[in-house]
Image (cartoon, helix red, strand yellow):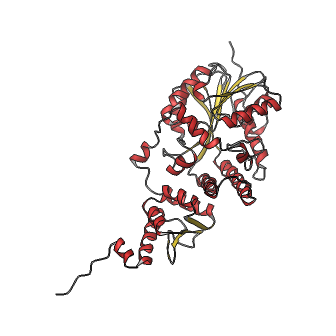
Amino acid sequence: MGTTTRPASPLRWAREGNAEGLDGRLLRALAGRVGPAAVRFSLGAASALAGEGPPVATIRFKDRKTLLALALDPVDRFGDAYAEGRIEVEGDLILALISVYRALEAKPGPSIVQRLGRYVPHTLPGDRKSVQHHYDLGNDFYRLWLDERLLYTCAYFESPELSLEDAQVAKMELVCRKLGLRPGETVIEAGCGWGAFALHMAKHHGVRVRAYNVSTEQIAWARAQAERQKLTSRVEFVQSDYRGIEGRCDAFVSLGMLEHVGLANYHELARVLTRTLDRTRGRGLLHFIGRDRPQPLDRWIRRRIFPGAYAPTLDEACRGVLVPAGMSVIDVENLRPHYSLTLLHWRERFERAVAENRVGFDERFRRMWRLYLAGSEAAFRTGWMQLFQVVFAPAGSVGAPQTRDALYRTSEGLHWNEPTS
């Protein structure tokens, strides 16, 4: 009788020295997980192409242990492996990430476990710790690559040739026009960053602003800027999150804060809107990173960059915050192309600072932030992420504008009508 040869197991294959064969199998398995992206994976002499045609980049592994980890879980393991230098990307990192995002977009939707990941518990101490994890890295770090006013939200490029500084001013003016701010009105800003927008509203539109933020470093900077610009009588910076907001206002605005609230706490924000916004002439604007379909941010971003963050869909934001607060949606705009261009400016400034050895952190941190900025740019370029601006007012408000013609044709902004008695 003849003998039957059984196929070797992966472990036996490696023990017998058939490393190239095992590496090839693992590379092909990984390529299948993320295909049809236009990237090549390689380890030593073995390689595998994830898509058809010439690759835009080669993702090279330093060792088989890293390759095995990514073959099992390519999305969540990539970030740490890249940050630690166990993976190198040879070629265009942005094009590689864009190709992978587009390939993943065609995959099946999130699993039940992933969908449950949208509901992250949020407490005041936990949220404060999460915000400080990201925003209290030091003002000197952010000054290396943000604009001169330290605005850390999507800019508005009326022309692609606009400088980042001018585009950020254009963004602030766009929001002010949408809100139709009038001199003497009161504004509450939830999540004010380094205070630039609060100061801009007070200085250029004659309003009084109470701005909230839990970041110690940002609040200290904002208060110092208010002193320097002699605006302390018109702008108050309060170190608290949205749950500590008090008083009444004519306009409520939040730029980039909703992402840190969490689905489970939307009802809390709705209560804030109900108790603060004037019911006859009040209006508000939410500016936030969002998605077209419900899906949590990947675990690497939530673990290393933005703990507890969640980017909602328009439906989730409206149903979770505006409907319970008794608000009507007045206007919706998606600024996604503007955010990809904003991120391009930030990434280029960050890379210049790295090249000039001005980033005072270790190599792992620098690689982690390079991937974060590049991945974010790719996400907005592909439509993986969106940037929504939603204007709202109390249901039945008589102050809502008749048309939106003036919003872009003139500098007057939306004409919010004065309520009649």
Q: Is residue 370 above or below residue 265?
A: below
Depth check: give the residue in front, 324 or 143: 143
Seen at 77% across and 21% down, the residue is: 184
Where residue 247 sits: x, y (%)? Answer: 64, 19
Depth check: give the residue in front, 290 or 244: 244
Q: Is residue 3 above or below residue 357?
A: below
Q: Residue furthest left?
A: 1
| Residue 273 visible in the shown view | yes
| Residue 394 visible in the shown view | no
Where residue 37 sits: x, y (%)? Answer: 52, 65
Depth check: give the residue in front, 61 or 207: 61
Name the quarter where the N terminus is drawn. Answer: bottom left
Name the quarter where the C terminus is drawn. Answer: top right
Q: Residue furthest top?
A: 421
Side (left or right) of 23 relative to 376: left
Q: Is residue 114 above or below residue 95?
A: above
Side (left or right) of 385 relative to 117: right
Seen at 43% across and 69% down, the residue is: 26
Q: Residue furthest bottom?
A: 1
Where residue 353 sits: x, y (%)? Answer: 74, 55
Q: Quadrant of residue 351?
A: bottom right
Q: Quadrant of residue 326?
A: top right
Side (left or right) of 107 relative to 279: left
Where residue 365 sits: x, y (%)? Answer: 62, 54
